[in-house]
Image (spheres, rainbow, N blue to C red):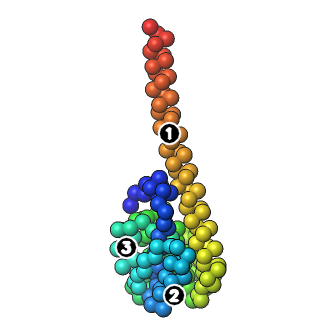
Amino acid sequence: MEIDAREIIKRQEDRILIIDDDESIRTTLKLILEDNYFVVDTAGVGKLGIEKVEKTFYNIILLDYNLPDTTGIDLARKINVISEDSEMIMMTGEASLENTLAAIREDLFDFLRKPVDQKYLLKAIRKALEQQDLMFRNRILLEDAQLLNEKLEKLNSLKSYFISL
């Protein structure tokens, strides 16, 4: 999914998708995040999460490590193909060095242990959003610089033409 960085920056709301098979966790996190002015969607299985990511850009995706139909790591790989600009945060009740390293290899923004501390979660989300914002702004600057370089090349061509007259 191609993301227009300018449109995302203009948008007044940040979208978060929670993919977790535990309904109470989905509901609790959704309430917490909506209280903090995020637009929140949920999915109980990886397949539904993928379907939502294919239709909508989410700034942040919170993933459970263990889902009924897939692992959070496999799901992160699939999401990265569809929406490489989404920042992902993995949550697990079974944190281990192996799980943490797998999350790092998949370039996930953070790895949180359940039960998730509300303050730490919000801090991680805000940091991820800041990083994403910088990435989008850098992309815009690069696009603008490229356009200016193309215009400069045209002007130099015109200059050369007029000098040769």
- Amino acid type, label 3: Lys
Reading the image, the residue beneath label 1 is: 146
Decide: marks 1, 2 in contact (CB < 8 A)? no
Q: Which mark is residue 127?
A: none
Q: Is residue 4 left or right of residue 135?
A: left
Reading the image, the residue beneath label 2 is: 28
x 50%, y 78%: residue: 34
x 63%, y 84%: residue: 117
* Neighbourhood count class around disc 1 (C-alpha, 10 Å): few under 14, some 14–19, many 20 upward: few
> What secondary structure is marked by label 3?
helix
User: Residue lying furthest top in this view?
Assistant: 165
> What secondary structure is marked by label 1?
helix
Quadrant location of residue 113?
bottom right
In this view of the protein, which residue sits in the foreground, 110 or 25? 25
Q: Where 31 falls versus 140 (above or below)? A: below
In this view of the protein, which residue sits in the foreground, 82 or 154? 154
**Disc 2 versus disc 3: distance between alpha carbons?**
20 Å
* Neighbourhood count class around disc 2 (C-alpha, 10 Å): few under 14, some 14–19, many 20 upward: few
> What secondary structure is marked by label 2?
helix
Locate residue 67, reporting x and y percent. 45, 86
* Neighbourhood count class around disc 3 (C-alpha, 10 Å): few under 14, some 14–19, many 20 upward: some
Q: Is residue 14 left or right of residue 49?
A: right
First along the sequence among labels 1 and 3: 3
Q: Where 58 falls versus 115 (above or below)? A: above
Does residue 71 show up?
A: no
Reading the image, the residue beneath label 3 is: 52
Locate residue 145, reporting x and y percent. 53, 40
Quadrant location of residue 48?
bottom left
- Amino acid type, label 2: Thr
First along the sequence among labels 2 and 3: 2
In the picture, the quarter occupied by the N terminus is bottom left
Quadrant location of residue 107?
bottom right
